[in-house]
């Protein structure tokens, strides 16, 4: 046994039995007094099942520092094969608790033929589908996306999401500050209608779709002091510049709201709407950037993001052109380019051209003279999501822990090992904690 000195001169004994390896963020004190973990995320720990008040329990947690991929907890591209019945797609995102958007598209391989895009989100609920290549209102299908899960989503037997012949691409966006948010509302027909959001920064792009009636997808971006650009996600139209005084959006969005006109497209009385909000984050640990580059016709353009992307959506805003969805999972490299067109039902394009190539600091566009990537002087807008990016993991300890300095100690750096000790005497109302050792072998 090992003795611990505690408050008021009391002591508690800890039996040095086996060590429990933590697999989640719960530390169950009924399992013993020695715990260990190697971090691969940023856990917020909770302590459960302490002894009754008046009985003391001392315990320790040995922590080996690790890294957290802070992008893969927010976004995932997953390719899966249809089976015609039902299946669960695991992508590591907790959509059930945190919320988000799942966008599914048949790749049209194996002679499966074209299928519409399928968009589902947690605000509207599973079974509620929108199609980016169509202006149709929301529809309900019970055998398409059937559930949002804590590590992905489930699909039913409908061929639009689970045809047994082709493979499917899915892009999942989890709600995350300075990355992505979803809001829904019912129109009231009033001017200057304010809609609250939780993006945590002013959105760079707001995509709005009516739910209870047919209408185009409004892709609003490039918010300036007096105007913004409007495009349509389901169409090839060039962008139009909209003044806040006359446009559907009445002012530049803020980090908590955006303001709408009394227009049927965004705020008709009794009508329902959804908006997908995307950030533009310039911080070193950013997940997403929305911007533009100038086309050169035939030739190469280097776009600097400060990091390499895993997903890029592009659209020539200066003229009629398609919306090109590109990701590294399906093919966006020096040797392949396999875009899916967001405004069409057609199959994935497959080519050996290296039209969009990720670099360590952004991406290079190699245009062959076509419109999609910009004629000379054209403005091409993009939305880029960062590839793999890791930082040292960080622990959030329970607020009930009292530390000697009043501040929780630092989490060990990746590859190093520290020991934290705790003690409770009041049934878990209060814990006394300290970092007992650093740099253990």
Image: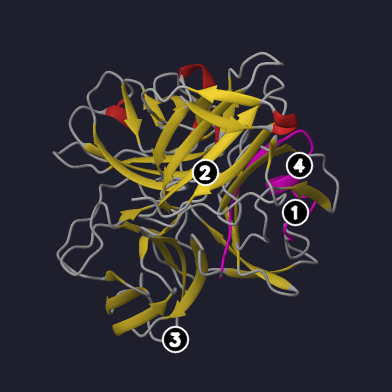
**Residue highlighted by disc 3:** 377
Q: In the rendered image of this protein, does residue 23 appear above or below residue 403?
A: above
Quarter residue 358 falls in: bottom left
Disc 2 versus disc 3: distance between alpha carbons?
30 Å
Disc 3 versus disc 4: distance between alpha carbons?
38 Å
Is there a contact, CB below 8 Å, between mark 4 and mark 2?
no
**Mark 3 neighbour class, 10 Å CA radius: few under 14, some 14 to 19, many 20 or more:** few
| Residue nearer the viewer, 4 or 161 | 4
Disc 1 versus disc 4: distance between alpha carbons?
22 Å
Please give the name of the residue rendered at 68% of the width and 26% of the height, measured from the top-left corner: 10
**Mark 1 neighbour class, 10 Å CA radius: few under 14, some 14 to 19, many 20 or more:** some
Q: Any magenta on residue 339? A: no
Foreground label between 1 and 2: 1
Residue 128 falls left or right of residue 326 = right
Q: Quadrant of the N terminus?
A: top left
Foreground label between 1 and 3: 1
Is there a contact, CB below 8 Å, between mark 1 and mark 4?
no
Disc 4 versus disc 2: distance between alpha carbons?
17 Å
**Mark 2 neighbour class, 10 Å CA radius: few under 14, some 14 to 19, many 20 or more:** many
**Residue highlighted by disc 1:** 256
Foreground label between 2 and 3: 3
Is there a contact, CB below 8 Å, between mark 1 and mark 3?
no
Question: Over which residues does the magenta segment extend?
Answer: 254-282
Looking at marks 3 and 4 on the same chain, the residue that comes earlier in the sequence is marked by 4
Where disc 2 sits, the SS reads: loop
Looking at marks 4 and 2 on the same chain, the residue that comes earlier in the sequence is marked by 2
Judged from this view, the residue extending furthest toward the top is: 52
| Residue nearer the viewer, 1 or 103 | 1
């Amino acid at each position: 046994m090992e003795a611990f000195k505690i408050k008021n001169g009391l002591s508690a004994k800890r039996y040095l039995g086996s060590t429990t390896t933590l697999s989640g963020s719960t530390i169950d004190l009924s399992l013993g007094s020695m715990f260990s973990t190697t971090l691969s995320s940023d856990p917020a720990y909770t302590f459960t099942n302490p002894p009754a008040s008046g009985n003391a329990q001392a315990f320790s947690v040995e922590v080996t520092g690790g890294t957290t991929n802070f992008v893969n907890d927010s976004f995932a591209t997953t390719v899966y094969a249809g089976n015609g019945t039902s299946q669960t797609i695991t992508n590591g995102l907790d959509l059930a608790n945190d919320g988000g958007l799942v966008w599914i598209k048949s790749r049209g391989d194996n002679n499966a033929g074209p299928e519409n895009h399928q968009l589902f989100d947690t605000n509207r609920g599973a079974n509620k589908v929108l199609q980016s290549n169509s202006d149709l209102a929301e529809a309900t299908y019970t055998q398409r996306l059937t559930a949002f899960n804590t590590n992905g989503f489930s699909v039913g037997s409908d061929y639009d999401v689970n045809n047994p012949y082709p493979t499917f691409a899915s892009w999942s966006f989890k709600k995350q500050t300075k990355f992505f948010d979803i809001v829904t509302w019912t129109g009231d027909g009033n001017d200057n209608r304010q809609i609250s959001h939780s993006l945590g920064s002013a959105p760079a792009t707001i995509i709005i779709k009516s739910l209870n009636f047919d209408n185009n997808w409004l892709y609003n971006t490039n918010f300036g002091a007096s105007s913004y650009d409007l495009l349509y996600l389901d169409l090839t139209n060039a962008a139009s510049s909209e003044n806040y005084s006359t446009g559907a959006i009445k002012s530049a969005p803020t980090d908590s709201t955006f303001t709408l006109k009394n227009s049927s497209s965004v705020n008709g009385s009794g009508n329902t709407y959804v908006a997908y909000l995307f950030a533009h984050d310039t911080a070193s640990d950013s997940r997403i950037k929305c911007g533009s580059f100038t086309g050169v016709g035939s030739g190469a353009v280097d776009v600097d993001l400060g990091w390499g992307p895993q997903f890029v959506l592009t659209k020539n805003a200066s003229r009629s052109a398609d919306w090109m969805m590109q990701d590294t999972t399906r093919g966006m490299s020096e040797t392949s380019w396999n875009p899916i067109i967001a405004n069409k039902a057609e199959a994935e394009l497959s080519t050996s051209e290296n039209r969009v190539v990720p670099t360590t600091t952004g991406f290079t566009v190699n245009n062959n003279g076509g419109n999609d990537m910009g004629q000379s002087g054209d403005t091409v807008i993009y939305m880029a999501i960062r590839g793999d990016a890791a930082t040292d993991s960080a622990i959030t300890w329970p607020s009930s822990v009292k530390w000697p300095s009043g501040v929780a100690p630092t989490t060990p750096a990746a590859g190093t090992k520290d020991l934290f000790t705790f003690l409770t005497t009041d049934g878990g109302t209060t814990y006394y904690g300290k970092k007992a050792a650093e740099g253990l072998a």
